[in-house]
Amino acid sequence: MRLRHRSCIRLLAFISDSPPPAVSAYPVRLCVVNIRTERVHWVTVGYLRMMLHKYETSARAKSSAPKAELLQRSLYLIFVRCMDASRTGFTVPLADNTTVTVSPRILLFCCEYQEERTLLSLKQHGSKYDCKPCMDDSESFAGRQGVNQRRRAVTSTVTDQLDGARMQNEHGNTAVVKEIEHTNGIHCRVPALAGCDGLGSGCKHLY
C-alpha cells in the first residue's frame, strides 16, 4: 500500500464479549498503548444499552431482533468517525509542530462464535451456512469436501443485507426477505464493521 509522505496506518484490535444477563449497559472502551513508554491508557468512548426482556413488548423469542439492531446502530454511532478516517485519514499534530496523517484500520476483531455471528449479522448455529468464511452446507463443511468450498464474498453478502434491510423497512418481513436470509444464512441487518476500510472494502477481511 502506497502512503503519502508523513502518513501512516494505526492498527486497531476490536474485542467483544456478551454481557451478563443482569447488565443493562456495558461500556465500549479504547485501549491506547504507547509503544515507547509501554504505558497503557483505557478510554471509555460510549455505552451499549441492553434491551431487557421485561421492557421488551414482543415475545421473548423475538426480542433478539431489536437487540441486534440496537447493537449495530450503537456500534455505528460510536465508530462512524473512525470508519470515515479509515478511508480519508485525519491529521494528528506532533510535538515538533508538524503533522502526520493517520488512517485507523481494524486489524483484528476477537470474540466467541455466537458473538461474532451477531456482530456480522449472520444467522446463529442451525442455519444453512454455519461456517463463517465459506458457503459450504452445514452438514458437510466439517468434512474433507468442505476444504475447497467457495468463500463467503464480503461485497455480495453485505449487498444482500443492505437490499434485505431496505425491503424489510419498506414492506416488512416479506417472503423475499426471508428467502434472502435463508439462501445466504444471514440476517437482513447491515453489520457496522462492514463500514471500516480493510474489512468491508480494500482487502476485505470481514470474514
Image: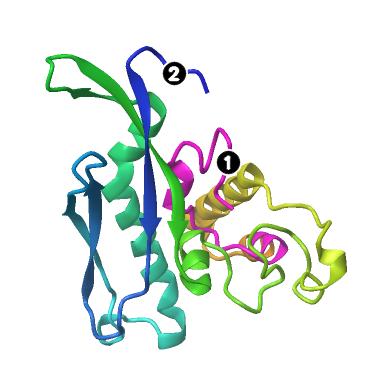
Q: Is residue 147 left or right of residue 95?
A: right
User: Which amino acid lies under the numbered mark 1 shown in the image of this protein?
Assistant: Lys
| Classed neighbour count for the residue bearing mark 1: other residues with Cα under 10 Å, few (<14), some (14–19), many (≥20) | some
Q: Nearer the viewer, residue 127 or 106?
A: 106
User: Horizontal and vertical percent for residue 150?
Assistant: 79, 53
Q: Label 2 belongs to which residue?
A: 3
User: Horizontal and vertical percent for residue 171?
Assistant: 53, 58
User: Which amino acid lies under the numbered mark 2 shown in the image of this protein?
Assistant: Leu
Region in magenta? 180-207
Residue at 68% from the left image edge and 60% from the top image edge: 184
Do residues under tags 2 and 1 come within 8 Å of each other at their CB atoms? no
Q: Nearer the viewer, residue 99 or 123?
A: 99
Predominant SS along the magenta part = loop
First in sequence: mark 2 vs mark 1: 2
The correct choice, above or below, for 139 with respect to 179 in the image is below
User: Horizontal and vertical percent for residue 15?
Assistant: 38, 60
Q: Label 1 belongs to which residue?
A: 204
Outermost residue toward the right in this view: 145
The correct choice, above or below, for 170 with respect to 90 in the image is below
Q: Helix or strand or loop: what does disc 2 sit on?
A: loop
What is the quadrant of residue 97 in the picture?
top left
Q: How is the image coloured?
A: rainbow
